[in-house]
């Protein structure tokens, strides 16, 4: 029953939805009689529809009266039947009426109206539209007329703002595209020409350089006249920047690979050709890349006369200039006190520290660098770098100064100082470790816990036990137990026995495994 009720409900809803379409199909296109008559007059003939005149008794008015050739009196044109009707009315002999026939069968006016409406609705009949051409063929007339543009005059197209704006946009686009293509072609041509010239100049430079290095002594090079020198390196070419660039690059490349007298010859030749003046001039350039290139050339060719200009660039806001200037000062200064590095206001990056460390390690054995001056810098990164230098260079004599500064520095610096004491293995600074273990800074406690095993004592071991009773995190717990094991094995065993947890058992197993001692 429920299924039947649901089906009936769906069917009713379908009928409600479709009822408008059903009524729409039955609706007459020609709604009233006057519009229908006007339509018949305008159309004239309609397929399947005929007309004839009858009298009041519905007798057919024969065509003998009307001089018609039709024996049935049927006429297909409605205008013709109306004209005949008017003639009969004027004779006063008859009262004619129009009879409507659909497929030669008489029908009422309403039936005829519905029939014509169906033809219109189904598309079997297309209503004629009003002819607005007044009987003239406009296409033929237009083809005979001579073409005349709507916009006339030289500036007619620019009179309209929109057309003008579009024209400007298109023009700018084409000009930009042409300029870009032209620029790319010029740039590529110049680059290709530069590469070709570099190859030519390189061939011209290699021969004379090889001859001077391998066939002349340093004394002969210094006594060489300008005429002989410029035979190998023409003065005209020395005025060309590209030739000088190739020559300098070749000399610098050779200077890095050569040793002994060869280096001295290259530096002497560099000065004889007055390339040193060009390098010093680059230090005053407004372009940072040229300044860096000048610093590299000063550094490689040992141009100590440029140290005053280099010192001015040590605190430059440009990272690359600043880095190269410090490296140049470290390499070329006879007495390096690192005061220029101490007074830097910009922080040191990891890359800078590695670069400076490489140079300082080389210079430490031959010069007094006064590394302890870095401890007083206002720049924290400089102070941290100083602590690292003490640790890496093994400067045990500076540990006393680090101990004095320990209490007044930040936790980050304390961690670095603790690492220094741990690395150098100085067991006398136990108070420094014991105080750090009680800190609220977890990173400082972790650093102290790692170092406690190397420089702690029995007091440190008891402090570690108290910290372990507070259940620290797993990583810190492991560091503390490892240090406790190194300091006092009996206390370590007692603590593991009294506090047997899963974490402690795992750590104990790890620490007792000889294969995992350094892990």
Image (cartoon, grey):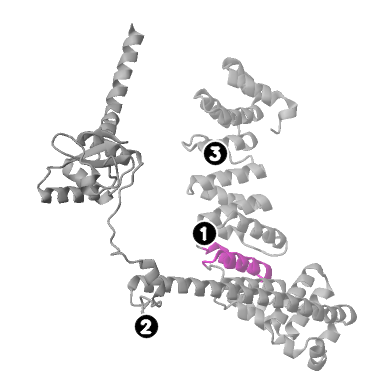
Mark 1–mark 3 Cα distance, whole angstroms, equals 26 Å
In the figure, 517 relative to 346: above or below?
above
Is there any visible trace of residue 275 in the rendered image?
yes
Q: Locate residue 486, reporting x and y percent.
A: 66, 30
Numbered label attached to residue 153? 2
Quarter of the view holding residue 206 = bottom right
User: How many residues crowd around disc 3 within 10 Å: few (fewer than 14), some, or many (20 or more)?
Assistant: some
Distance, label 3 to label 2, CA atoms, is 101 Å
Tell me if residue 39 comes above or below residue 160 in the rendering: above
Q: Which residue is mark 3?
A: 431
Quarter of the figure that contains the C terminus: top right
Residue numbers of the magenta segment: 317-344
Marks 2 and 1, Cα distance to the nearest angstrom? 80 Å
Residue 236's tag is none
Q: Quadrant of the N terminus?
A: top left
As rendered, which of 248 and 371 lies closer to the eye?
A: 248
State the predominant SS element of the stretch in magenta. helix
Disc ID at residue 377: 1
| Farthest-out residue, left | 92
> Which of the two labelled residues, at mark 1 and mark 3, occupies the earlier sequence position?
1
Q: Is residue 39 visible?
A: no
């Amino acid at each position: 029953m429920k299924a039947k009720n649901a089906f009936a409900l769906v069917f009713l809803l379908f009928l409600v939805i479709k009822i408008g379409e059903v009524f729409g199909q039955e609706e007459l296109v020609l709604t009233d009689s006057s519009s229908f008559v006007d339509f018949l007059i305008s159309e004239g003939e309609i397929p399947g529809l005929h007309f004839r005149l009858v009298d009041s008794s519905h007798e057919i008015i024969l065509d003998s009266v009307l001089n018609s050739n039709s024996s049935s009196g049927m006429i297909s044109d409605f205008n013709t039947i109306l004209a005949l009707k008017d003639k009969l009315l004027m004779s006063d002999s008859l009262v004619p009426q129009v009879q409507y026939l659909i497929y030669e069968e008489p029908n009422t006016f309403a039936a005829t109206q519905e029939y014509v409406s169906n033809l219109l609705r189904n598309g079997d009949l297309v209503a004629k539209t009003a002819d607005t051409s007044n009987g003239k063929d406009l296409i033929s007339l237009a083809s005979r007329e001579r073409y005349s543009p709507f916009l006339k005059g030289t500036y007619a197209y620019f009179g309209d703002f929109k057309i003008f704006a579009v024209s400007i946009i298109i023009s700018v686009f084409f000009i930009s595209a042409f300029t870009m293509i032209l620029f790319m072609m010029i740039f590529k041509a110049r680059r290709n020409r530069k590469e070709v010239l570099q190859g030519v100049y390189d061939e011209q430079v290699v021969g004379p350089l090889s001859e001077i290095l391998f066939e002349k002594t340093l004394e002969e090079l210094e006594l060489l006249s300008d005429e002989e020198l410029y035979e190998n390196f023409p003065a005209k070419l020395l005025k060309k920047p590209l030739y000088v660039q190739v020559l300098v690059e070749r000399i610098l490349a050779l200077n890095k690979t050569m040793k002994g007298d060869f280096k001295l010859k290259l530096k002497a030749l560099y000065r004889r050709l007055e390339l040193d003046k060009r390098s010093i001039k680059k230090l005053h350039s407004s372009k940072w890349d040229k300044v860096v290139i000048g610093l590299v050339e000063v550094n490689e060719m040992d141009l100590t006369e440029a140290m005053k200009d280099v010192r001015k660039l040590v605190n430059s806001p440009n990272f690359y200039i600043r880095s190269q200037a410090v490296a140049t000062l470290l390499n070329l200064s006879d007495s390096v006190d690192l005061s220029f590095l101490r007074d830097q206001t910009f922080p040191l990056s990891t890359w800078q520290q590695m670069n400076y460390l490489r140079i300082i390690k080389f210079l430490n054995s031959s010069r007094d660098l006064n590394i302890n001056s870095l401890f007083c810098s206002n720049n924290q990164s400089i102070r941290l770098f100083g602590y690292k230098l003490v640790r890496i260079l093994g400067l045990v004599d500076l540990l006393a100064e680090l101990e004095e500064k320990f209490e007044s520095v930040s936790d980050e610096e304390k961690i670095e100082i603790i690492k220094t004491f741990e690395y150098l293995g100085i067991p006398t600074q136990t108070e420094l470790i014991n105080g750090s273990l009680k800190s609220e800074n977890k990173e400082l406690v972790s650093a102290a816990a790692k170092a406690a095993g190397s420089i702690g004592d029995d007091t440190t071991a008891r402090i570690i036990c108290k910290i372990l009773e507070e259940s620290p995190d797993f990583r810190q717990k492991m560091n503390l137990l490892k240090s406790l094991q190194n300091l006092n094995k009996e206390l370590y065993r007692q603590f593991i026995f009294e506090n047997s947890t899963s974490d402690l058992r795992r750590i104990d197993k790890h620490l007792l495994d000889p294969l995992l001692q350094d892990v």
